[in-house]
């Protein structure tokens, strides 16, 4: 899902060229709302919503990923802020949410987790 309708048009153009559009179900709107309206398990859940909602998205997605499937989240290093959150009372809400998100996933024994420090950090968790 994506909240920008122009991205749906772009996706259709690119994926049609690769003859893959017919395999995609693309929704426009808030990810949490659309995710709650869909059923079934997923091979991949990609998270790049508002950072304050990262823990909420993880709680929604973790049960909907099939074994061997991936949960991928962008911006998990949050410009390095997650590494320097020594004073939790002074940390921005978005940084605290990302730290909580990362800890929740790291502590989940149903997933193997890796953070690639490329750019702003990409977390990949594979369901066992």
Image (cartoon, rainbow, N blue to C red):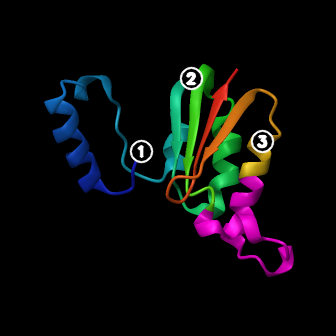
Looking at the image, is mark 3 or mark 2 nearer the viewer? Answer: 3
Does the segment drawn in magenta span residue 51?
no
- Residue placed at 64% from the left, 67% from the top? 80
Residue corresponding to mark 3: 106
Label whose residue precedes the other's in the sequence (2 or 1): 1
Marks 3/2: CA distance? Answer: 21 Å
Residue 91 within the magenta-colored segment of the rendering: yes
Depth check: 73 or 11 in front?
73
Say left or right for 68 vs 30. right
Distance in Å between CA atoms under marks 2 and 1: 15 Å
Left/right of residue 23 with respect to residue 1 in the rendered view = left
Disc 1 crowd rating (10 Å Cα; few below 14, some 14-19, many 20+) is some
Mark 1 lies on residue: 1
- Using the image, determine if residue 63 lies above or below residue 74: above
* Residue density around tag 2, few if under 14, some if 14–19, many if 20 or more, within 10 Å: some
Q: Which of marks 1 and 3 is nearer the N terminus?
A: 1
Mark 3 and mark 2 lie on one chain; the one further toward the N terminus is 2
- Is 10 or 115 nearer to us in this picture? 115
Q: Is residue 16 left or right of residue 80?
A: left
At x 75%, y 71%, the residue is 84
First to last magenta residue range: 78-101
Quadrant for residue 23, please give it: top left
Left or right of residue 91, residue 62 in this image: left
Q: Which of 73 and 56 is in front in this view?
A: 73
How far from the left and from the top, in percent, is residue 41?
Answer: 56, 23
User: Residue 51: where, in percent of width, then height?
Assistant: 60, 62
Quarter the N terminus occupies: top left
- Compared with 68, 33 (above or below) is below
Can you tell which of label 1 and label 3 is closer to the viewer? 3
Mark 2: which secondary structure? loop
Q: Mark 2 highlights which residue?
A: 41
Secondary structure beneath disc 1?
loop
């Amino acid at each position: 899902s994506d909240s920008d309708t122009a991205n749906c048009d772009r996706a259709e153009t690119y994926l049609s060229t690769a003859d893959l559009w017919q395999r995609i179900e693309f929704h426009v709107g808030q990810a949490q709302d659309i995710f709650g309206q869909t059923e079934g398990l997923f091979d991949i859940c990609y998270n790049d919503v508002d950072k304050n909602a990262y823990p909420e998205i993880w709680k929604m997605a973790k049960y909907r990923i099939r074994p061997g499937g991936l949960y991928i989240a962008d911006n998990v290093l949050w410009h390095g802020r997650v590494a320097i959150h020594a004073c939790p009372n002074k940390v921005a809400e978005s940084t605290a949410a990302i730290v909580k998100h990362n800890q929740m996933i790291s502590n989940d024994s149903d997933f193997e987790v890796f953070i690639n420090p490329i750019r702003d950090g990409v977390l990949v968790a594979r369901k066992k």
